[in-house]
Every structure is written in structure tokens, then in C-alpha cells.
Image: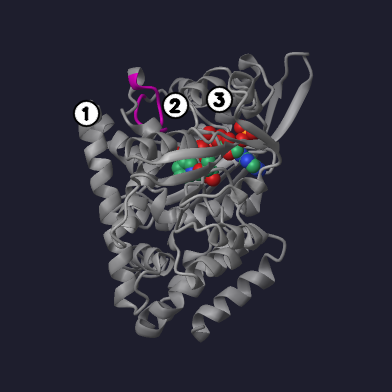
Amino acid sequence: MNTYAQSVLDQLKKRFPTQKEFLQAATEIIDSLSLVFDRHPEYEKAGILERFVEPERQINFRVTWIDDAGKVQVNTGYRVQYSSAIGPYKGGLRFHPSVNNSIMKFLGLEQILKNSLTGMPIGGAKGGSDFDPKGKSDNEVMRFCQAFMQELYRHIGPDTDVPAGDIGVGAREIGYLYGCYKKLANNNGCALTGRGVPYGGSLVRTEATGYGLIYFANEMLKTKNQSFEGKRAVISGSGNVAIYANEKATQLGAKVVAMSDSDGYIVDERGIDLDLIKKLKEVERKRISEYVKIYPNAVYKKGCKDIWTVKCDIALPCATQNELNLDSAKILVQNGCKCVAEGANMPTTLDAIKYFQDNGILFGPAKAANAGGVATSALEMAQSSQRMYWSFEEVDKELEHIMKNIFKMCDEAAKEYDCAGNYVIGANIAGFKRVAESMLAYGIY
Ligand code: NDP
């Protein structure tokens, strides 16, 4: 590794020894960028990497709310405003008990590069809380969202910081959060994306991350004269990203045979009934195990990891970080899988990524492959500014165009740095250079 890159990574390891997800993301990124610093000594001179890995601002706050039994509950709220080099901070909010500073920083760091790859003027951020919406009543979720926004509203705004959804934050939560924001801030601008269409949201935002993932994977497949037609796909998760990845993959001719939630996974050899999944997960908020009550020929297995033992041509991890490890990667390759594209953020461990690449598997990294969600959020911001709505077809066409362009940028950057086909390196370099050039232009501050 380039000595400058190595020294910055060593410093991070020394300063944040317990932030393992952050160090994992930083290691992957800095390892790829090493090649850039060999060619651009001006970045070292301006301390670009040290500044890039240090968030511009981190806000941790107390969120106090009252549950249905009348008991006072306390959670921690987070917003990491990582980089505004190329535009207002932008990145989702995650509500999940595992949320902590390390997870917020890894997601925020990834988000800078992802947002840069979209080619749109949006900086990088992430936020959320260790609150778990699972098992809570609608009223409890509403009270929590309002308590969370009572602090967050002063840090966000249409030209400052524009959060969106992520794990545990869907249409219901965004509605409560935005309703509270507009009241407290006395501002009806686009300070949150993923809003409902009646109150300023964009068509296709719900589908965007999943659809975008498939558009990106399709570009990878084309390089080998392949397509989704007739392929078997396995998709982990059954949330927003997984559901719409399934929908688009199926539209393009694939058969999705397995999906999961955090308790277990289902296998349906005839192809998963997506309408049933949508009903169970989006409407009734039930467990995926319910699927086999309707389809007794399908199989339910407890535990998530073994979903990767289901034979497939294309694997799409769409649940959470580090859900696909080296053992799973070996089984996928042994079973003939040819393409892996990340719908979730950092779902694949570093050694598993290396194994895929060493075995010639097409591998699409999250920051490129799942950028369709944030890109469509930027389209939502544009529509809000114009006071206009674009049609489903217009937004979908623009999304497809953006995903093809992201693929092209990754492909070209990888080739420029003599790593053709390595879209991890391509995505990191292409995303970073736009941010680094902007930082250079601003001088040191
Ligand atoms: P959802 O909350 O809609 O769905 C998450 C899914 O993953 C659920 O099926 C959930 O199961 C499962 N899951 C969550 N945590 C775990 C865990 N620790 N172990 C196993 N399964 C788990 O989230 P999204 O679909 O929005 O997000 C999924 C991934 O995609 C995340 O990594 C997110 O950061 C990323 N992403 C999302 C974008 C978006 O637009 N929504 C944009 C870009 C990236 P259960 O129902 O049991 O909790």
C-alpha cells in the first residue's frame, strides 16, 4: 500500500480500535485509493485523506419518549454529517438496536462515495437511533419519531442536510418525521426524502434502490454477454431493497427462489410469490415464516446465514452488513454462482469479496450497486425545488440512465488504474476523485 494511505489507515486503527465496522469500510476504501495517491501527490500535500475520513460534524443526542404502558423510554439519536464537499449532507436514518457510532461512521463514509458516483450535487451523511420499531405500536413509533425530530430538526434543512430512510425507517416513519419537521421548522421544503407522493415525494423512490441494483447488475452481466433471463436468484432480506430487487429481477426474466428476514429464510422452487411477501412485510409487518402457511410446498429454515447454500446464478445480499462471509462465498462459488451485487451496505466481508474476485465472479459493490435510492432522492429534491411531479416512467428512465452511468464510471476508473473488472476499486476511485478535487478547490479549512 502507498505509504501515505497506510499511515492514515494506521492512525485510524490507533484512534478508533473498537469501531470495527468503520475500520472495515475505511480499510476497503483506503486500500483501493492507494493507487490514486501514487499518481496524485498533491492530495497528500493538502491532507485530503486525513480530512476525508474525519466527519465534518457528529451529533449524538438523547431521545426521550413514553411507551403505551406510560413508561419513560430513552434512546440515543445520531447524525454524522460526514462531508459537504459536493453538496448538502445526504444519507438515510436507520432505526435498529445495533446502531452505534461505528455503524453510523461506516455508513456515512460509504455514503460520501456513493453520492459522488451518482454525479449529483449531494454530500454524505448517515443517522439513526438504537430504537427498534419492531413490535412497537403505531402510536409508539409516532411518539418516538416526534421525540427524535425535536432535536434533529435544528440540524437539517433542504440546503443543509436531507435525511431519508434506511433499515427500520420506511414510509410510516418518514411520514411522522416529516410531519414533525415541518411543524417545528415552519418549513415545507424537501428536508427529508422518501416522503409520500401526496406530500412531495417522488414516484419510483420506493422501488429505486432495488430497481437500481438490478440495472447495475445487468450492466455487469452484459460484459459477459449474459442477462437475468432464465437465471436463478437468491435475495437476502425482505425489506424495501429486497422486495423491489425481486420485482425488477423477475421482470427481467429471473426466478427468485429464496428470501429472508432476521429470523430465517424461505425457499420456493416455483419462484417466490412477491405479492404475498409485500402483504406480509409491507402491510401486515409479519415474519417471513408465515409464507409457508400459505405455500406448504415452500420450505422455511431458521437462521439467515444458510440462505447462501441455496443454489443460484445470481446472489443479491439486501439485508444488512457482514451477512455474507467467506464460508458462504465458497459455497456460492462451488454451487455455480456467477454474479454477486450488493443491495445492502457492506453485506460482504472483505475476505469474501476477495474470494469472489479471485474466482472471476462479477462483483458489484454497494456504493455503486445500491446508489439508485439516493439518486432518486436527489430527483425528489429536484422535483420539490421545481414544485413539479415527474411521471413514473420519467423517473424510472432517469434512474436507469444514472445506474448505467455509475457502472460506466466504475468500469472506466478500474481500467484507468489497470484493474479492469474490479468494480470495488473502480467505484472507490471514481467516487473519491470528485470529492478530492472539490476539497482541493476550497483550500485548507
Ligand atoms: P428494511 O428495514 O426495509 O429491511 C431490512 C431487511 O433486512 C429486513 O428483511 C430485515 O429483517 C433484514 N435485517 C435487518 N437487520 C438484519 C440483521 N441484523 N440480520 C439479518 N437480517 C436483517 O431496510 P432496507 O431494505 O431499506 O435496507 C436494507 C439494506 O439496504 C441496508 O443495508 C441499507 O443500509 C441498504 N440500503 C437501503 C436503501 C434504501 O433506499 N432503503 C438505500 C441504500 C442502501 P427483519 O424484518 O426481521 O428486521
Any atom of ligand 1 within 8 Å of the CB at mark 3? yes
Q: Quadrant of ligand 1?
A: top right
- Main SS, magenta residues: loop
User: Which of the two labelled residues, at mark 3 and mark 2, occupies the earlier sequence position?
Assistant: 2
* Helix, strand or loop at mark 3: helix
Residue 193 within the magenta-colored segment of the rendering: yes
Return the residue at label 2.
Answer: 185
Above or below for 310 versus 136? below
Of residues 360 and 183, the one drawn nearer to the viewer in this rendering: 360
Q: Name the residue carrying label 3.
A: 281
The Cα atoms of the two marked residues, 3 and 2, are separated by: 33 Å
Q: Secondary structure at mark 2?
A: helix
Residue appearing at x 31%, y 66% in the figure = 411
N-terminal label among 3 and 1: 3
Residue 78 is inside the magenta segment: no
Give, as a single range, the part of the protein colored magenta. 188-197
Q: CA distance from mark 3 to mark 1?
A: 28 Å
Q: CA distance from mark 2 to mark 1?
A: 27 Å
Report the mark closest to the observer, 3 or 2: 3
State the residue position of label 1: 390
Taking 285 as reference, is 343 left or right? left
Residue drawn at the location 67% of the way across and 64% of the way down: 16
User: Viewer-proximal residue, 32 or 155?
Assistant: 32
Tag 1, which secondary structure?
loop
